[in-house]
Image: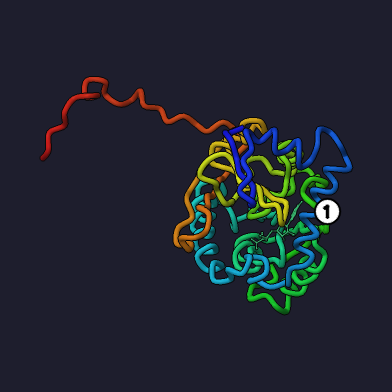
Amino acid sequence: MDGCGLDSDGREFKNAEEMWREEVGDGDPLKKSQWYSQGVGYWQGVEATVDGVLGGYGHVNKPDIEGSEAFLNSILAERFPDAGRGRRLVALDCGSGIGRITKNLLIRYFNEVDLLEPVSHFLETARRNLAPENLMVTEEYKAVNFFCVPLQDFTPEAERYDIIWVQWCIGHLSDDDFVSFFERAKGGLKPGGLFVLKENIARSGFILDKQDKSITRSDLYFKQLFNKCGLHIYKMKDQKGLPEELFAVKMYALSTELPKRVNKSSRSKRHVNRPGIIK
Ligand SMILES: C[S@@+](CC[C@H](N)C(=O)[O-])C[C@H]1O[C@@H](n2cnc3c(N)ncnc32)[C@H](O)[C@@H]1O
């Protein structure tokens, strides 16, 4: 995996394999379960508010949702032009926290949204926030299932989802659980369905946060993992408008199908590499 990394105390690792050996062990189930229980344990101590799930950066909610909405709209227009006209859309919000993304975005576009979140007080808050009487949408749109499980233990119902949204939570998964989660979750996508992964991006390699047991991966690291999962980038975009001191954030729409190649053969070969006339 992409290069060397650091932990939050400034310690250097030669590579990700060295870090994972120390953090989750080499096939040692006890060590791995400690990694996950420390991660969930960290969030169990956080208040169930927008500010809480955004690490004290509640004001990031607005630009985050606006960036996601533009990205989602471009995907829906291209992939599901029949949405609302016969096709009912279903989404899964992974590591949903208190349901911030569902409430502010997904519930306005998807007829059904399921939420997955391992921290029970977050999920209970989500359930309240998304109760029909607290939603500003018609009965056609609703939050349906609330799964209190972590991603590494979850297998979705076959072909239920048009979009599986994974935001600001995949850093809690080790590389092997990342790959096995996406391999299982592919079966939960309808034909033509997509994953949207929105994440913090390290400049290179990775950064391990020892407090909440998560890692921030580089763009190259993510691409190497997508490759291992057999996933292809359908579309990607940088999130704009976040405070300078935060990590860069990227949105990836991922497909199980190879992207269609643009057929360039129709372009006249005669004009390739010739200076153009400025009219
Ligand atoms: C930074 S919060 C983001 C919450 C939500 N995605 C949002 O953007 O508002 C990280 C979330 O990941 C959840 N999480 C931690 N470990 C997880 C795991 N193993 N599987 C799924 N979610 C996890 C936390 O409980 C928390 O709700």
Q: Which image quarter is the C terminus in?
A: top left
Q: What is the residue that sits farthest to the right in this orientation?
A: 30
Say what amino acid the circle numbered 1 marks.
Ser
Residue 30 visible here: yes
Left or right: residue 233 versus residue 269 is: right
* Residue 75 vs residue 274, the one in the foreground: 274
Left or right: residue 27 versus residue 126 is: right
Say which residue appears at 54% left-offset and 52% top-offset.
76
Q: Which image quarter is the N terminus in?
A: top right
Above or below, comparing residue 50 to residue 161 in the picture:
below
Residue 151 in the image: state x and y as whole percent.
77, 49
Residue identified by numbered label 1: 37
Colour style of the rendered protein structure = rainbow
Residue 165 visible here: no
* Residue 116 vs residue 179, the one in the foreground: 179
Q: What is the residue that sits farthest to the top in this orientation?
A: 270
Helix, strand or loop status at disc 1: helix
* Residue 123 vs residue 25, the one in the foreground: 25
Above or below, comparing residue 81 to residue 221 in the picture:
below
* Location of residue 229 (image quadrant): top right
